[in-house]
Amino acid sequence: MRLVPRLLLQSLAILAVSAVLALGVNFIRPDGPAPVLAAPSAVQLTKNGGVIGIKDAAMLFITGRAVFLDARSQFEYQQGHVQGAISLPPREFASQYQDIKPSLAGKEAVITYCDGELCPLSHNLSKLLREAGVKNVYVLVNGWSLWQAEKLPIAKGTAPQGSAGQSDGKPSGKSAASGQSAASAKAGKSAKSAGQGGICRECENN
Amino acid sequence: MPRMREQLTALVPWDGLEWALRLVLAGLFLYASADKIIHPKDFAVIVKAYHILPDPLANLTALWLPWLEVVVGACLFMGLWTDGALTLATGLLAVFWVALIVNYFRGIDVSCGCFTTSAEEKAPMLWYIGRDALLLALALFAVEARRRAGQAAQG
């Protein structure tokens, strides 16, 4: 055989054998396969929604990749909520959903929460959202208690239903926003700043 | 002078030289692969640090490259698919050399990852570049020795 075809054939054979060996051995390694592809994010969400952990929720909050929906009553929302969260009790879903719909666009996750391990509101809201065609809905079980326990950014005060807590500027609930009117806050704009609240001191009352 | 050079060249035992160089290269490649196979994730970090390949490709390279070195080393050692193995060995060394030089001029100080994945054994970039140049010269010399050995066998 001529030199060049021989070189090519032999090189290809060596490449093929090494590829088979590499992949084969990688998948039977005692310490488990090393990742073939780099993980795009530390937060690994299931495609069709489900339950989300507090660490993942916090990560998405900090990076502004999620919108938080507070499923509790308006009264409880005013007492304190995840900074930037939108109030959307399930019973008011029908009347409010169209208003908040633009806020959900472009987000990796829509996170619903209420308070308590067995609280059904966040699950109910999640179900309603899914029925409305929102697929990336995740329930943060016992969300409000966990959020407070981790001292993550919260806010107090009123915010119109169907819009993000744009009056939520204060990074910590200890010195809560005193219920400034957020009537002018547009839902989309509000959601944009929602996730950044945790680290953004400039987000106050934008 | 050309006649004298031909006579000297004829005296060189090219087949023996080719065999010896092949064994040296085989040893180098087999030795270089071991630590990378044991620590693929550490090696992936080193490959990514070169900032030449996108992340998924860097990861794949970190998995594949050590095994390519094993097969190339084994082929060189056994004299199997020798032409292909020598070509790949030379090509790999050339690619490593260029990658080091490119990063040197980009100002990126990388850990070579040539023989170990340990960050503790880091040396200056110029040392890596010089060492790789020598290895590349060795591989090219092996290719030339093989060519001459082939010619001597035919003639």
Image (cartoon, coloured by chain):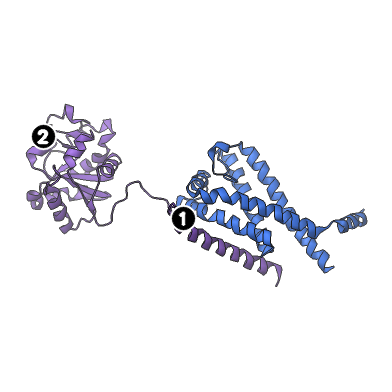
Chain colours: A purple, B blue
Callout 1: residue from which chain?
Answer: A
Residue depicted at 18% across the width and 56% down the height: A130
Q: Residue furthest front?
A: A30
Q: Position of residue B29 (x, y in %)?
A: 63, 52
Question: What type is the residue that disc 2 sits on?
Answer: Gln
**Which image quadrant for residue A154?**
top left
Is A28 drawn above or below residue B50 in the view shown?
Answer: below
Is A46 drawn above or below residue A155 in the view shown?
Answer: below
| Residue A83 visible to the viewer | no
Q: Position of residue A195 (x, y in %)?
A: 26, 40
Circle 2: element type: helix
**In this rendering, the label closer to the viewer, 2 or 1:** 1
Lower sequence index among marks 2 and 1 = 1
Is B72 drawn above or below residue A176 in the view shown?
Answer: below
- Residue A30 located left or right of residue A166: right
Camera-side residue of B72 and A7: B72
Label 2 Cα neighbours within 10 Å, binned few <14 / some 14-19 / many ≥20: some
Label 1 Cα neighbours within 10 Å, binned few <14 / some 14-19 / many ≥20: few
Residue depicted at 73% across the width and 58% down the height: B143
Residue underneath mark 2: A79
Do marks 2 and 1 share a subunit? yes
| Residue A179 visible to the viewer | yes
- Residue A85 located left or right of residue A23: left
Residue underneath mark 1: A29
Real-space Cα distance between discs 2 and 1? Answer: 53 Å
Q: Position of residue B131 (x, y in %)?
A: 67, 43
Q: Position of residue B148 (x, y in %)?
A: 80, 61
Camera-side residue of A4 and B10: B10
Question: What type is the residue that disc 1 sits on?
Answer: Arg
Camera-side residue of A90 and A50: A50
